[in-house]
Image: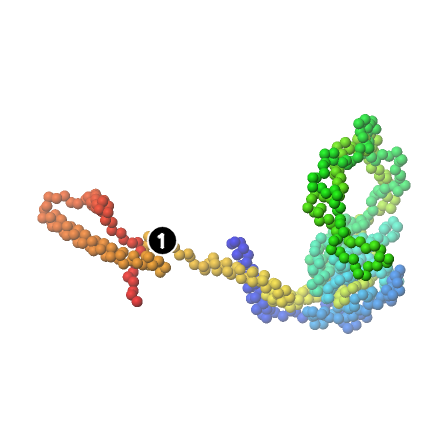
Amino acid sequence: MYKFISVEFSLICLILIAVWQSGSAEEKPSAPKYSTPRPSGKSYFAEPFDSDDALESWVHSKATKEGVDSDIAKYNGQWNIAQSQENALSGDSGLLLNRKARHYAISSKLDEPYEFNGKPFVMQYEVNFQNGIECGGAYVKLLSHSEDFDLEQFQDKTPYTIMFGPDKCGEDYKLHFIFRHKNPKTGEFEEKHAKKPTADFKSYYTDKASHLYTLVVNPDSTFKILIDQTEINSGSLLKDVNPPVNPPKEIEDKDDKKPEDWDERETVPDPDATKPDDWDEDAPQKIVDPEAEMPDDWLEDEPLYIPDPDSVRPEDWDDEMDGEWEAPKIDNPKCKEVSGCGTWEPPMISNPEYKGKWKAPMIANPNYKGIWKPRMIPNPNYFEDLEPYKMTPIGAVGLELWSMSDGILFDNILITDDLSVAADYATKTWNLKKMIRAESEPGLVAGLLKAAEEKPWLWIVFVLVVGLPLVLIYSFCCGGKKKADPKKTDEPTPDDPHDSEAEDEGDAEEKKEDASAEKEDKESQNEEEEEKSGEDEDEGAGDTKSAVTKEDLEKDEDDEIEALNEDNTVVRKSPRKRKPRVQD
């Protein structure tokens, strides 16, 4: 109980703190003003989309998809430069995918090709699913560098080096990191997919806020993936991708065949076993119960069904057209009162002699050789690439997407080889948006009230959280102490106002006894004082009587009590001293 009160009291404190904070929100300093960011160091691509002519450096694809119907082969989606729908920073814009069910393709060349020459590869950008996301991607393709590459022909088959970013359809939430690895022996490319993150990142797709996606590929072939500058996935290009970069040294021989005499059976029927002579394979599994007898109340002459006596031939019934009319059948009511009707047949029981088909018992196979597998041979395509970091140089950034959601806003795309440059760029962009969003979000109390407006049943929860602990605290701390029962104390107490009338009628008689007892006490006290005075005078005159000791007084007191007991005269004084009643 006390733990419960402690938890409830903590919740109240949190609510009070939230109220205080919301009341002092006006005293918070204003957020820094936004200005178009510039990289603080080396960058290969930096696009804030803030200028009116930002799309002039991007090329809309005029290509068509291969192997699809003509009505969906064209990239018919149009891009726009727009501000965020909520919490927009003055002067800040982004690249907007503004219509659903369209195919989009747009690309822009890097300031110079990025070559993996020993420095980290860092790519980051912002995505805001302003209207949520049903099915569609928001990933970026980093296109492989080529001297004769035409951006107008950018389409889904265009070679890329890295594909990175969020993707979602239904309840399948993904964060892609795919790189195309070149086989050093054949020159062919194969996609390598990073392992799936173990962290739960569903909220980044549903909260309608701008999120910062960052990919870092290090020269030691390790990688890190971050969302909002928090790491959610990491690993090695050699160990944590599928399929693996390096093929196995040995493979199964495709030409190897299992020998005809190879026996994979672990057990076989015992060849020396024989069927017993008394084994009857023809014995039935069920037989008629020979001990069954027909119940005495069984009505063999009564049918199970009889014509319905209440049925009437329809007036429009035509025997020539409909045939001879017969009343519909119903259950024979006589059969319900007995064990049964009609022909009686004894029930079937399991045949104790039944054994079924005889089979020889199983024994270990003396010729068992195990499960056959093809022999292993050296892999003719084996190679070992210990530096998958050294990927194909990147020449352009491309967005090639299809989406069933609109309002997807891209912003602040950056490619660099310096982590500090990326961090500084995020400080000038995404961190400001995070600050603005935090200040515009309602406090705890406002959030609770808003939630209660949408879901009125939450008021019950609020009352229980706040009201119940207050009642408990008042009961424990302010309820007062329980009054003692006057019947269980020897202290004088006033009259009980609820005493019975019989007790009131006895008060007068008791008063007379009390007055008589008080009179006797006073007379006894006067006599003792006179005796004591006389004894003092005798002692002062030099009387030869001995002084009264403590033992003598105690003895006299005991004698007096005994005398009173013998005379049956006991002076009783009530422990409750009643006050005289006031006459009306």
Residue 54 position (above or below residue 258): below
x and y, in percent, of residue 211 in the image: 71, 62
**Which residue is depicted at the point 84% across and 67% down?**
76
Residue 351 in which image quadrant: top right
Q: Nearer the viewer, residue 575 or 414?
A: 575
Residue 231 position (above or below residue 92): above
Residue 159 in which image quadrant: bottom right
Kind of residue at badge 1: Lys
x and y, in percent, of residue 583 in the image: 29, 65
Within 10 angstroms of label 1, few (less than 14), some, or many (20 or more) residues?
few
x and y, in percent, of residue 248 in the image: 82, 44
Q: Which residue is mark 1?
A: 487
**Which residue is depicted at the point 62% across and 67% down?**
453
**Which residue is depicted at the point 79% across and 55% down?**
178
x and y, in percent, of residue 448 in the image: 61, 65
Q: Secondary structure at mark 1?
A: helix
Residue 436 position (above or below residue 194): below
Quadrant that contains the C terminus: bottom left
Residue 11 in which image quadrant: bottom right
Q: Nearer the viewer, residue 350 or 132?
A: 350
Q: Is residue 337 visible?
A: yes
Q: Is residue 394 visible?
A: no
| Side of 343 where 446 appears, left or right | left
Color scheme of the displayed model: rainbow
